[in-house]
Image: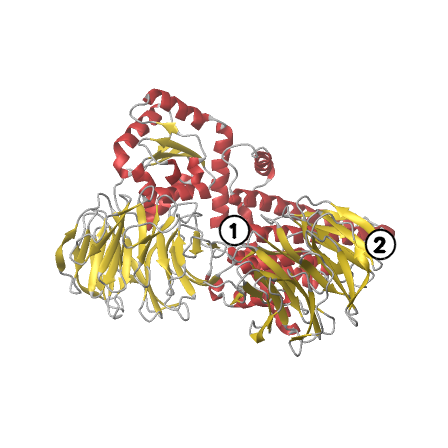
Amino acid sequence: MTDVFISYCRRDKEFANKLHSVLVGQGKDVWIDWEDIPPSVDWRAEISTGIEEANAVVFVLSPDWIASRECNIELELAIASSKRLLPIVYRDVQYEQVHPALASINWIFFKEAESFDESLAKLIAALNTDLEHVIFHTRLLVRAKDWKEHGQDSSYLLRGSDLRKAEQWLAASEAKDPQPAPLQIEFVRTSHKVLRRERLTVGGISLGLAITATSTLVALWQYHRAEGHRAEAELREKVARVNTLMEVKPVNGLVLALHTIGISLSDDSQEGLNEVRSSLLSAIQGNHEKNRLLGHEGEVYAIAYSPDGRKLVSADEKGVLRFWDLQTGQPLGNPVSALDVPIYAIVWSADGRMIVTGDANGAITRWTTMGNRIGESIQAHQGAVNALAFSGDRIVSGGDDGKVRLWDASGQAIGQPFEGHTDAVYDVASSPDGQAIASASTDGTIRLWSLEGQLLANPLQGHDGGVLSVAFSPDGQHVVSGGLDYTVRLWDLQGNPIDLPFVGHENVVRSVTFSPSGQTIASASPDRTIRLWDLQGNLIREPIRGHEGFVLRAVFTPEGDTLISSSTDRTIRLWNVENHLASEVISAHNNVIQSIAFNSHDQTFASASADGTIRFWDTQGKPISSPLQAHADGVNAIAFNSTGTMLVSGGNDKLLRLWDVQQRRQIGQPLKGHNDAIQSVAFSPDGETIVSGGGEDDRTIRLWNVADRQPIGQPFEGHSSSVQSVTFSSNGDRIASASKDSTVRFWDLQGRHLTTLQGHEFGVAAVAFNPLKNVLISAGGEGILRQWDVETARPLGSPFQGHEGFVAAVTYSPDGRTIASTSEDGTLRLWDNNGNPLGEPFRQNNGVVSAVAFHPNGHLIVTGTEDGTLHLWHDMIVERWLAIACEQFQGYQFLSSLTTLSALELEAIAGAQNTCKFLQAES
């Protein structure tokens, strides 16, 4: 073990040498790599071991360190091992470009203007802080790693005083740096569990010889009671583990979720099912992996697919090429040990007959699609070849020497190098028509060139730091770029930025690409995510997670339904572009959708809009008949009667209208009485009565007789502002109303005010009764939901919190177990009856989600938005989530190829298999 590992860029070698010398002079044992050679697998393993066995890692920050692949990998290794990180600044860097793990730590400045001795004293003090804690951290990590590398053999676990010291160290680590690594925690906990199990086994034998028959019964009762509590605790622990895994290993999270729900199903406990259905939903929402290609023994730097999209070629840090069948995920032939240096770039020709690679030594090599070399390698650049592209039949290359070069298919140079960049060229791209070339450089610019090397526009400048990736849109009208400043940027061909930068990544953006449709941009980053954006810079969905290392490359397949990525974790992964629970989107109205209602008789639904129309739809989103021109000034609310034969609508024209559903025509004359817009309507359960709520200048609730279309009694008065929502209880004996005055009121059918519910602050937009319980839910302007006991008028539990804007609509599922709410934050959220969110929010990117309704069978939710769009969300029940999860799991053939699975992971896989077998048998 060593005191310190020094991570530095080769250009700062002189300073690193000086730092090494003075630290050794201070009695420190220092690990530093002086070899200026291309990285190999053995070299990478040596670096990894050096970091793991060091008490602290010092990072010599400079612009070149930030741009260095290898330096960032060293940081990633240090973070993975939870090492003490000590950033020192040798040459000025931009704070925004520094990895958050280092940016959040106080820097020690060793710039020329600073006193070296003073800075050294600060560094020594930092190295010596909590030194005993740090030394134990290193020793424990080494033992934990040894245990893991020996297949988690129990003989390598801690015992006796070693275990006691480790548990004491963990308990005291909460406020110290560095924090324990996950592997250390697992190692100590497993040691404790194994020791406890051994003691129980021995103790159980001796105890069994002594107890009497009576005490045996008592012991058995206590045992089963304890087992019930233990099983419940273990279930909750597994659910928590699923949620943690979804952030880093979604496939593992999905497998564990299936295992966990299998336990709850076999227990035949509805409560057990409630515990895990949220984790199951999160698992299928967050897991997009379709397949994983395994076989590379080094980090996968480059990938390219054949023009027909059926094959893939990949290249790694060892200089190995591999060919794959994308339909099956199987390798094609044997790996080609092509070169002895890392391959940084690879491209497939448009005619499908040639593959070209670029390597760390500056050479370009041509290959057949069978992996045979074509001629000799071409020395193309001084320093590495970082990027390749085909422009027609020409090869385009970009390198560390800051030049862009063209080559013909035989490997002959075409013209002179394109010069202008002042630092390394990291990416090149060809326009769809082959007439323009884009290059991205760490000098902070993107340049657009003609095939003769002439600039087509002024350099594109805007990134705060180097640019690492560039791509043309399919129509050739735009360029997208990704940079060291963690942003994605969109440009026109005149060099003008389009809108604001796309912000979200937590590390540099290594790869950008357009979908074949040109409507989606994908970006990949060392933050281990791939993100999908629309052209306005909105995230289309949550980031795609799963890689366990830097994501270096991401490309769309020609069909656009799959993304392929490569990573330092030595894998290539295929991802579903579409979410498994993606909504069906319908452009339905020309203005905000105010209300949605299902017809329980034929299971169609209707939507009402501020554009004045009501439209009818089937459950696939196909329109039924022409729109009803219902209310000239806009429709605010609609409701079906229980038999589905009649629809009532209320509008800004202060009128109620009744409609014959089958004939699609109005019944009689409009119902008049309100003095302002009608904001809400509802039928009684027996269909004989309608309730309506009036706007700001009316503030009343009115009852109407359906048979003669006459008002019943006097208006209900009491609210001091607009009545936004009205509804009947399931037995029809009371009415609930919600108002902008921030109250909910209960009334009997004679208009007597029963009670007032208070708890919201900025108005109440909607209320709904649970169909099976005497419970009401209300949606507030402050972004929260509250449940109430109808009999006592008391709140039930804590408010439901999660929305980031006012809640516009809320409803219960037909079985009363699930609540759906929508908000101005652009989301649909699902909740259980205890206020726990189910899965992640369903984002719609259409502004306010203004309306929501459940299909009578609970499988489908329909939402409406302020731009007139309908979203149909199918498969919204746990049984369908389980089926989807099993479909995903059964497609993961690569699980059988993984050789480093822990006992817990193997248990989860077996449990998931049993769950899916149970589901198959039941269906």
Q: What is the CA distance from the residue labelled 2 to the residue labelled 1?
A: 53 Å
Asked whether, in this view, residue 633 is left or right of residue 744, the answer is: left
- Which residue lies at the image location 64% right of the left edge and 69% below the top edge? 918
Amino acid marked by disc 1: Glu
Asked whether, in this view, residue 229 is left or right of residue 312, the answer is: right
Secondary structure of the residue carrying tag 2 is loop
Which residue is labeled 2 in the image?
A: 752
Q: Position of residue 891 (x, y in %)?
A: 50, 67
Q: Position of residue 703 (x, y in %)?
A: 78, 62
Amino acid marked by disc 2: Arg
Query: Badge 1 local density, few (<14 within 10 Å), some, or many (20+)?
Result: some
Secondary structure of the residue carrying tag 1 is helix
Residue 632: give its label: none
Asked whether, in this view, residue 370 is left or right of residue 179, the answer is: left
Which residue is labeled 1 in the image?
A: 247
Would you place residue 152 above or below residue 165 in this image?
below
Of residues 909 and 588, the one nearer the viewer is: 588
Residue 316 in view, yes or no:
no
Asked whether, in this view, residue 220 is left or right of residue 251, the answer is: right
Of residues 181 and 471, the one nearer the viewer is: 471
Of residues 477 and 75, the one nearer the viewer is: 477
Check the picture and name the quadrant holding the N terminus.
top left
Q: Would you identify the image quadrant in which residue 91 lies? A: top left
Q: Position of residue 117 (x, y in %)?
A: 34, 20
Check the picture and name the quadrant holding the C terminus.
bottom right
Q: Position of residue 277 (x, y in %)?
A: 64, 59
Query: Badge 2 local density, few (<14 within 10 Å), some, or many (20+)?
Result: few
- Which residue lies at the image location 32% right of the left edge and 35% below the top edge? 62
